[in-house]
Amino acid sequence: MRLVTQGQTIVIATRTGSKKGVLHLTRRVPKRYASVEPRKLVSFSLHTDSMSAAVVKAAAVWDQFIAGLEAKLAGDTTDAEQRFAAARDLAEAKGFRFLRSDKVAQLPLEQLRDRFAAISGFDEHSEKLDKREAAALLGGVAEPPLTITRCLELYWTLSKDKRLGKAPDQVRRWENPRKKAIGNLIQVIGDKAIQEITGDDMLDFRNWWLERIEEEDLAAASANKDLIHLGDVLKTVNKMKRLGLVLPLTDLKLKESEAKRRPPFSRTWITDKLLAPGALNGLNAEARAILLAMINTGCRPSELAALTENTIHLEHNVPHISIEAELRQVKTSYAQRKVPLLGVSLEAMRAFPSGFPRYRDSSASLSATVNKFLRENGLMESPGHVLYSLRHAFEDRMLAAGIDDRIRRDLFGHRLTRERYGDGASLAQKQEMLQAAAL
């Protein structure tokens, strides 16, 4: 017996030894799906002998089948994220939630059998097994790594409820600090996958903030706000995407006392440890040169990273560098200055007469790179020391050499606490005074 309704053909299949029949839905597969469904006709049991019930069931069965074909089409792509989304949708179309293969393996035997039974062709010859369905139901499609940037993109969708009722300007003010926090993290550790973020990465980010607080005279609250917003974004994605990650976001908050002055490296530590033969060989050449340049100039890492061939003057009677607003905005007008090059700092700059292109546009990662190297190689004098401690060490050596406060402030780019008269010491005079402090 057949019934044709809305393009569907419902066929009664007689059961063996029974007068009643089980109704099936038989329908031609649209040509659109030929690449993912080789059969021209498909048939599904409706599990009823009632014609009225079969008509109702047929529509739902067909819709579910088409949803599965659409998911297969979407998965026929080289885009890893689209392929994973298609596998998830296909699993749902078959009536299951997508699970990673390791989670599927932990399912009770009965649930595992249900998944296998739902794979088209499972009970037939292996050549007819639907590999797409098998991958979707058994977790054979790997979830693509979610980069930090992608996490932020997903976060906007996953946190729609937090924007409800906000005016456009309120939304902008809510979004901007999260964008800033994510941007800062990427500058320091790179746009890595969320599952690859390590405890060391977050400590590097924390240390970067400590140095920035000191360099720019910021409050610890600025760093803590970044950490709060990072936690909001990454934890939301981890939870809502069911990643099950243990993110290294705890015990990072800065105390006001930590934002104070970092300890200087001692002269002995610099000469015996940092300048020991081969001590810095594992550090990339540009970062190593910037570290050495800091020793006898006391310049901020970001200032050295921004140098170009126009601000490096090695052929001058007094080799020196100029800290000026060429490609960047200087901190204050006092920060614009000329600093003589001596000793290991001069030698380091001679190797890079045109500056440091690797860090010119990404100085945030510089401190993280150096701090990580020094920490891993036992070259930090104490847990409180960071790259920026070289700037303090330089000031201590200038003080020990009896260099006047006006000269020290000029070399450091600091504001004078009294009225400023005259042009100060010449480059040659500064060079001569620094001889006793140089290493």
Image (cartoon, rainbow, N blue to C red):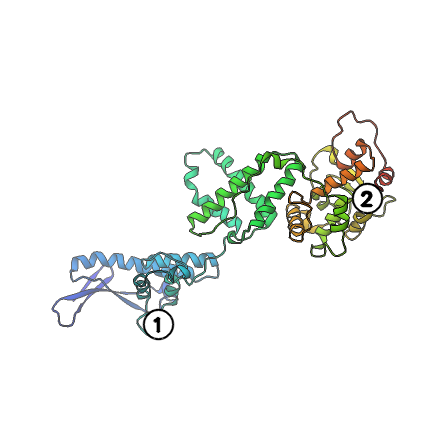
Q: Which mark is residue 118?
A: none
Q: Is residue 174 left or right of residue 259?
A: left
Q: Which residue is mark 2?
A: 438
Quarter that holds the N terminus: bottom left
Which secondary structure lies at badge 1? helix
Q: Is residue 350 visible?
A: yes
Seen at 65% across and 40% down, the residue is: 211
Amino acid, disc 2: Ala
| Spot occupied by residue 293 in the image (x, y as percentages of width and height) | 76, 47
Amino acid, disc 1: Lys
Which secondary structure lies at badge 2? loop
| Spot occupied by residue 363 in the image (x, y as percentages of width and height) | 66, 46
Seen at 70% across and 51% down, the residue is: 287
| Spot occupied by residue 338 in the image (x, y as percentages of width and height) | 80, 39
Q: Which of the two discs, 2 and 1, sits closer to the camera?
A: 2
The part of the image, by quadrant, that contains residue 40 is bottom left
Which one is earlier in the sequence, the residue at label 2 or at label 1? 1
Between marks 2 and 1, how big is the CA–CA gap? 78 Å
Labels 2 and 1 touching (C-beta < 8 A): no
The part of the image, by quadrant, that contains residue 322 is top right
| Spot occupied by residue 225 in the image (x, y as percentages of width and height) | 54, 37
Seen at 29% across and 62% down, the residue is: 110
Q: Is residue 309 left or right of residue 167?
A: right
Q: Residues within 10 Å of mark 1 (few under 14, many from 20)?
A: few
Total marks placed:
2
The part of the image, by quadrant, that contains residue 56 is bottom left
Q: Which mark is residue 128?
A: 1
Q: Residues within 10 Å of mark 2 (few under 14, many from 20)?
A: some
**Looking at this rendering, what residue extends furthest in the top direction?**
419
Please tell me whether residue 373 is drawn above or below residue 301 in the rendered image: below
**Looking at this rendering, what residue extends furthest in the left direction?**
19
Q: Is residue 308 visible?
A: no
